[in-house]
Image: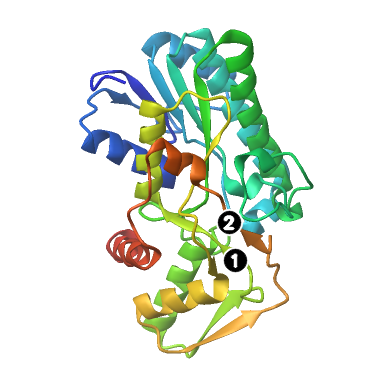
Amino acid sequence: MELNSKIYVAGHRGLVGSAIVRNLEAKGYTNIIYRTHEELDLTNQADVQAFFKEEQPEYVILAAAKVGGIHANNTYPADFIYDNLMIQNNVIKAAHDYNVKKLLFLGSTCIYPKMAPQPIREEYLLTGALEETNEAYAVAKIAGLEMCKFFKRQYGDNFISCMPTNLYGPNDNFDLKSSHVLPALIRKFHEAKISGKHTVEVWGTGTPLREFIYVDDMADACVFLMENYDGEQHVNIGTGEEVSIRQLAETVREVVGFEGELVFNTDMPDGTPRKLTTVDKLHGLGWKHKISLNEGIKLAYTWFLENYK
């Protein structure tokens, strides 16, 4: 990509898209375009086609998606599968129709098989049953990965995919009904500290193991792949490091400064027991994360204090 190349970032206001825009701007890219949901409904094929015809983007980063935690995925599975299929089908097809030079599609490591061997290699996709609470979202995102692969195979389109692990950071979703675990913990501990509570409830047993990467590191990896990778297989984006939910909660408690106790609600689901990615492929290409989990949580909490209402 040239610094003046026209780059369309879909989903620029979300956790992922906003970080990608920050990274592109920091690297000197000057011709980044985007639309709000109100300006362009990506689930509407005619509107997406009209947008691509008018703007003729050279590069596309598809970070727009309907996302949420266990509760949201469990409660609204029809919305998750429909919205995500429509968004990616429309954008990927339009990118093909209007000769986009390169497209990056973002999956998520939660779409690997529930009992995939650990750590998870790229080739483990589609080798086993999915996590039940996440199935609708996973089926949609898997379809997007496969769509990029097959458009590359049939038409020679330079459509690549990546598989980020659990993300957190600026512009995260802190709604307790629909957020992922880390932002939910930040909000829970902050509100408990402010209100003087003595305990904070954590869903599940605290034993599941998870991998987290700060969203600005993830964005840097995405831009790196746009600049350096053209392969058919998707690429894991992560740290290759894991932490239990209990350890995560204790770290967030320390960063926020809450002095009370943790109470684990074992009536709530744990989700996948362990989810760690192998990032050998990404490291082999020459990229490695820079921000540690403790440092990242401090940055995320600072952003929360400054921005969240």
The quadrant in which the C terminus is found is bottom left
Label for residue 209?
1
- Above/below status of 152 relative to 169: above
Is the residue under label 2 in contact with that under label 1 (CB below 8 Å)? Answer: yes
Question: In front: 239, or 179?
Answer: 239
- Above/below status of 145 relative to 167: above
Label for residue 276?
2
Measuring from the top left, give residue 84's x and y in whole percent. 61, 35
Question: In front: 252, or 227?
Answer: 227
* Left or right: residue 33 compared with residue 184: left
Question: In front: 228, or 62?
Answer: 228
The residue carrying pointer 2 sits among few (fewer than 14), some (14 to 19) or many (20 or more) residues within 10 Å by Cα, namely many
Measuring from the top left, give residue 112's x and y in whole percent. 67, 46
Measuring from the top left, give residue 13's x and y in whole percent. 39, 41
Task: Identify the amino acid type marked 2.
Answer: Leu
What residue do we see at 59% from left, 66% from top? 209
Judged from the image, the secondary structure of the residue bearing numbered disc 2 is loop
What residue do we see at 61% from left, 75% from top? 206
**Label 1, label 2: how many angstroms apart (C-alpha)?**
8 Å
Q: Sequence order check: which comes first, mark 1 or mark 2?
A: 1
Judged from the image, the secondary structure of the residue bearing numbered disc 1 is strand
* Left or right: residue 74 compared with residue 35: right
The quadrant in which the N terminus is found is top left
Task: Identify the amino acid type marked 1.
Answer: Leu
